Amino acid sequence: MSVTRAKALAALVLLVPVFFLTGCSKVSELGFPGGVTSVNNEALPLWQGAWIAGGVVGVITLILILWPAVFHRPKVGAPEFPKQTQYHVPIEIIYTIIPFIIVAVMFYYTAKKETVIIAKSTTAMHEISVNGFQWSWQFSYLDAGKDAVVTGTTAKPAVLVVPLGEPVRYTFTGNDVIHGFWVPAFMISIQNIPGVTNQLEFTAKKLGEYPGRCNMHCGRAHSQMRFTVKVVTPADYATYLESITGSQA
Ligand SMILES: [Cu+2]
């Protein structure tokens, strides 16, 4: 009976990762499509690695929970408590060191990717300034002149138009409180902090419209701090810049 139970439990535990790791490539991307931006290309393996690490830890934890529940149930006539093994120093050392190693490995890969993602180059072809304020966004297209500025409102969120395949240097600032520029599909989240200038360069690699929002709770209308990123061809981008220059849209 116990051997059959053990086999059934092992089969169940093995099926879960097999289900997630096989199938089409979309499943392996675990909810984030690759190739949307240059940042996305860098960050996707980190995302997948974090899920795999979480999955392994989850499966081991599940086994440790189910094993005693299935195989060490109280027997009729047995004492109320089984043998207690508290203050078992080797076990306590092991369960202190293992989480430390897990966090250290994840920190190492995160820091390594972050260094690549925030690196500045001289290849940026455009400059766009992103200013967060209570409660919307302002996008200034610096290479089109100081007056090429688009300001959103909660009723009419702004659209950030970016060129396909051309590297852009973004500068992030905040007017009043801290805001968070977040485009989930791009795997980009960077803060707009008053008095601090953050920068990030990236290249959009797929045409389309992508929703963005503020992910720092910044006040009453925080949830309405939405915007859209629209990736267009370089020709359409040039036309767009002409259409907003001088208009203070
Ligand atoms: Cu905000």
Image: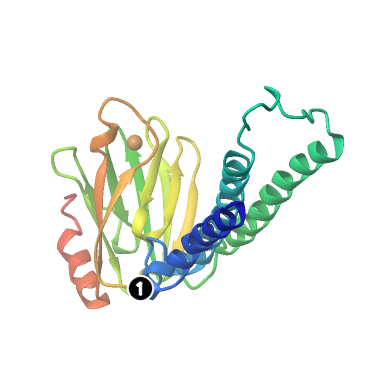
Spot occupied by residue 216 in the image (x, y as percentages of width and height):
40, 36
Q: Label 1 amino acid?
A: Lys
> Looking at this view, is 94 or 110 the one in front?
94
On screen, residue 155 above or below 40: above
The reply to whether the residue tagged 1 has its Cβ within 8 angstroms of ligand 1 is: no
Please tell me which residue is depicted at 79% across the width and 36% down the height of the picture: 92
The residue pinned by badge 1 equals: 205
Is 96 left or right of 208, judged from the image as shown?
A: right
Side of 166 where 1 appears, left or right:
right
Image quadrant in which you'd find residue 164 = bottom left
Residue with the most extreme front position: 77
Q: Quadrant of ligand 1?
A: top left
Picture coordinates of residue 12, whole percent (x, y):
49, 58
Residue at the top extreme?
Answer: 80
Number of other residues with Cα within 10 Å of mark 1, as a class: few under 14, some 14 to 19, many 20 or more: many
Q: Please tell me which residue is depicted at 19% across the width and 39% down the height of the picture.
A: 153
Q: Is residue 37 visible?
A: no
Query: At x 71% / y 24%, what residue is drawn?
Result: 79
56 or 205, nearer to the observer: 56
- In this figure, which colouring scheme has been used for the structure? rainbow
Q: Look at the numbered disc 1 and give the secondary structure of its residue.
A: loop
- Whether residue 142 appears in this view of the structure is yes
Q: Is 164 placed left or right of 109 in the picture?
A: left
Q: Position of residue 83 (x, y in %)?
A: 77, 29
Image-quadrant location for residue 99: top right
